Image (tube, rainbow, N blue to C red):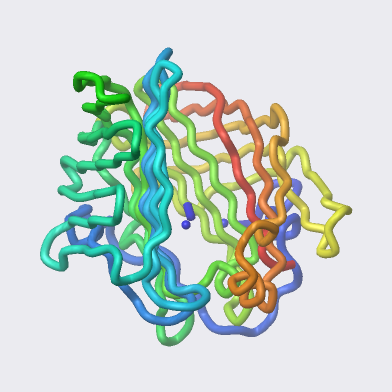
């Protein structure tokens, strides 16, 4: 559920935020980077209305199709630890799709290993070999995800909020090989192989409590990937921009950064919304690796088109909408963008470019 400095020329804080005020402290991404283990994947199953947890994985099979898989655990509304599973395998014009909502007693998980069974879907394994399964009336599929770049966490992986340090936690799978065995319409099992990425996140606080806005963009080109996420905190908490950026090349981590300069070059002023949210549609960024002074990077994100401007509460059920509208007036903005990124390591320069999806979410002014 995401992925935020003084800026050159135009401040993102000014662009996306209101004035600061005295509030509870925020502690972003402390200590050294943690090695991702099974313990980072097992559901945390927190209490409280704000708890939510999500697993999301995508893979592409060039010229043939794609895979999408998600599991979401949530307490918002009536009942705790509700599960929603959804996803699809689309290949050669055919599709195996699934979507189901489950009460807490309709799905199960293991406490001593990573294994979740939820109606038509399953996820389990280790960070070195995740297994996803799903089925519908048309067929079934089973995918094994083997990392290219190792799973990554931004330092200890957590943003902690307030004196009681309630957490939001992030684990990123920058790139993996997806090997999928499947059967459609009763046919003989076949296999297909592609590449993908994923994430696992959980929070003890609803996004409307912790964030005024978030943004995220991810791209992959050849052996390169990048993943950028930012959050602007607010509400009862001090206003901070909390970013991370991770860049990989094959199995190598090229860059991790938590403090880079962001310069908005094109802004959408949403005059159609009562909060008149401001959205950076194109931007540049520059910085250095968090620990290696000789590693510098710069990038450019350029809007191609805006494909989405959406009231995030429009299609949710009445009970959830009633609760959420007391806290936030959320809007989602989605863009197709072009990116160009350079990483300079001593005299070596790595340069890659491509197209990506870019998202901005506003919750409160």
In the rendered image, the residue lying farthest to the left is: 112
Residue at x-position 16% and y-position 40% = 129
Residue at x-position 83% and y-position 51% = 270
Q: Position of residue 357 (x, y in %)?
A: 57, 35
| Occupied quadrant, residue 337 | top right
Numbered circles on residues, count? 0
Q: Position of residue 303 (x, y in %)?
A: 69, 31
Question: Can the viewer see residue 18 in this picture?
Answer: yes
Residue at x-position 64% and y-position 66% = 212
Residue at x-position 23% and y-position 56% = 117
Residue situated in front as seen by the camera: 1 or 297: 1
Q: Position of residue 54 (x, y in %)?
A: 39, 57
Please give left or right for residue 163 compared with residue 242 in the image: left
Residue situated in front as seen by the camera: 15 or 117: 117
In the rendered image, the residue lying farthest to the top is: 63
Residue situated in front as seen by the camera: 119 or 342: 119
Q: Position of residue 353 (x, y in %)?
A: 52, 22
Question: Can the viewer see residue 350 in this picture?
Answer: no
The quarter in which the C terminus is drawn is: bottom right
């Amino acid at each position: 559920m995401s992925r935020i400095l003084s800026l050159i020329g135009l401040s993102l804080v000014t662009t996306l935020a209101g004035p600061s005020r005295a509030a509870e402290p925020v502690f972003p991404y402390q200590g050294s980077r943690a090695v991702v283990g099974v313990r980072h994947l097992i559901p945390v199953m927190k209490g409280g209305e704000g708890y939510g947890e999500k697993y999301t994985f995508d893979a592409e099979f060039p010229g043939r199709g794609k895979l999408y898989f998600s599991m979401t655990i949530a307490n918002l509304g009536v009942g705790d630890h509700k599960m929603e599973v959804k996803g699809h395998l689309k290949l050669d014009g055919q599709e195996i799709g699934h979507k189901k909502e489950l009460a807490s007693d309709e799905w199960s998980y293991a406490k001593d290993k990573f294994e979740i069974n939820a109606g038509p879907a399953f996820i389990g394994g280790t960070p070195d070999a995740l297994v996803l399964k799903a089925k519908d009336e048309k067929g079934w599929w089973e995918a094994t995800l083997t990392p290219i770049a190792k799973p990554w966490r931004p330092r200890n992986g957590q943003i902690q909020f307030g004196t009681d340090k309630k957490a939001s936690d992030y684990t990123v799978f920058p790139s993996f090989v997806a090997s999928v065995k499947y059967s459609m319409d009763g046919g003989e099992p076949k296999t297909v192989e592609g590449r993908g990425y994923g994430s696992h996140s959980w929070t003890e606080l609803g996004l409307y409590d912790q964030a005024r806005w978030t943004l995220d963009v991810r791209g992959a080109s050849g052996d390169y990937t990048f993943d950028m996420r930012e959050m602007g905190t607010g509400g009862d908490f001090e206003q901070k921009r909390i970013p991370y950026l991770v860049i990989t090349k094959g199995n190598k981590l090229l860059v991790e950064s938590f403090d880079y300069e962001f310069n908005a070059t094109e802004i959408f002023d949403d005059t159609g919304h009562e909060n008149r949210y401001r959205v950076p549609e194109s931007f540049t960024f520059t910085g250095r690796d968090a620990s290696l002074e000789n590693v510098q990077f710069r990038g450019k994100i350029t809007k191609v088109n805006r494909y989405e401007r959406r009231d995030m509460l429009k299609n949710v059920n009445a009970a959830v909408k009633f609760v959420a509208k007391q806290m936030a007036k959320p809007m989602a903005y989605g863009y197709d963008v072009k990116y160009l990124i350079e990483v300079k390591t001593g005299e070596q320069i790595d340069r890659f470019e491509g197209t990506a999806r870019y998202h901005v979410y506003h919750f409160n002014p």
